[in-house]
Structure formats: structure tokens, C-alpha cells
Amino acid sequence: MTAPVTITVRKNGSLLVTGDVLLLDHEGQPIERPAGKPNMALCRCGHSQRKPFCDASHKAHGFIDPPDAPGTVAP
């Protein structure tokens, strides 16, 4: 049995995706994961030079999480 796919929202950072997931572009074509990386971090700030992957540009640009959406419960 394979481990479940999880997506973790990192505080003021990327989305960490773990598990066997297929990432597709806007045309449905597969996007290769970075070599040797079992997990992938996806950009949320929009400043990465390696989109859709995170390159830690959020740190230099001071990215801060938006407020929680109405009706959500913080863990």
C-alpha cells in the first residue's frame, strides 16, 4: 500500500507535497519532479524562478500568509 498524498501549507512559505502524486501543467502534460527529491515544494508567493517549484524566493520578498478564509478553522 502506498503512503497517502499530503499537502502541507508552510507558514509564510511553500506548499510541501509528499507522496506519489502526478503534477500536470495547464495542458495536462506531466511536470517532472526535481531529480532525487521524494517531496516537492510548490511556490505560493509567485516570485520563484523555478515555477511551479519553490526556490525560497518568498524569504527575500517577505511573503506573508494571507488571512484564513472565512469559515475555516485553524488547527
Image (cartoon, helix red, strand yellow):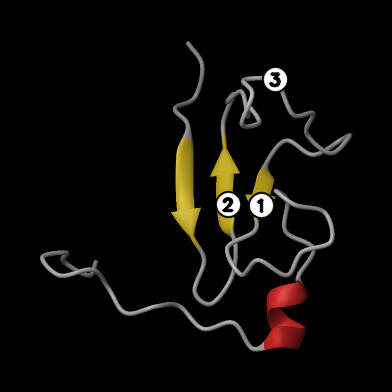
Residue type at mark 3?
A: Gln
Question: Where 37 sits versus 66, above or below?
Answer: above
Tag 2–tag 1 contact (CB < 8 Å): yes
Q: Position of residue 13 (x, y in %)?
A: 59, 70
Residue type at mark 2?
A: Leu
Calculate the distance from the C-alpha at mark 2 to the C-alpha at mark 1.
4 Å
Q: Which mark is residue 62?
A: none
Work out which residue is located at the far left of the displayed protein and give it.
71
Which type of secondary structure does the marked residue at label 1 adopt? strand
Question: Where 58 sits versus 62, above or below?
Answer: above
Work out which residue is located at the far right of the displayed protein and give it.
35
Which quadrant holds the C terminus? bottom left
Calculate the distance from the C-alpha at mark 3 to the C-alpha at mark 1.
19 Å
Within-10-Å neighbours for mark 2: few <14, some 14–19, many 20+: some
Q: Which residue is mark 2?
A: 16
Which type of secondary structure does the marked residue at label 3 adopt? loop
Residue type at mark 1?
A: Ala
The quadrant in which residue 22 appears is top right
Q: Position of residue 1 (x, y in %)?
A: 47, 10
Q: Which residue is mark 3?
A: 29
Precedes in sequence: disc 3 or disc 1: 3
Within-10-Å neighbours for mark 3: few <14, some 14–19, many 20+: few
Name the side, left or right, on which 45 lies relative to 32: left
Q: Residue at x 49, y 24 (%)?
A: 3
Name the side, left or right, on which 14 lies relative to 34: left
Q: Which mark is residue 41?
A: 1
Within-10-Å neighbours for mark 1: few <14, some 14–19, many 20+: many
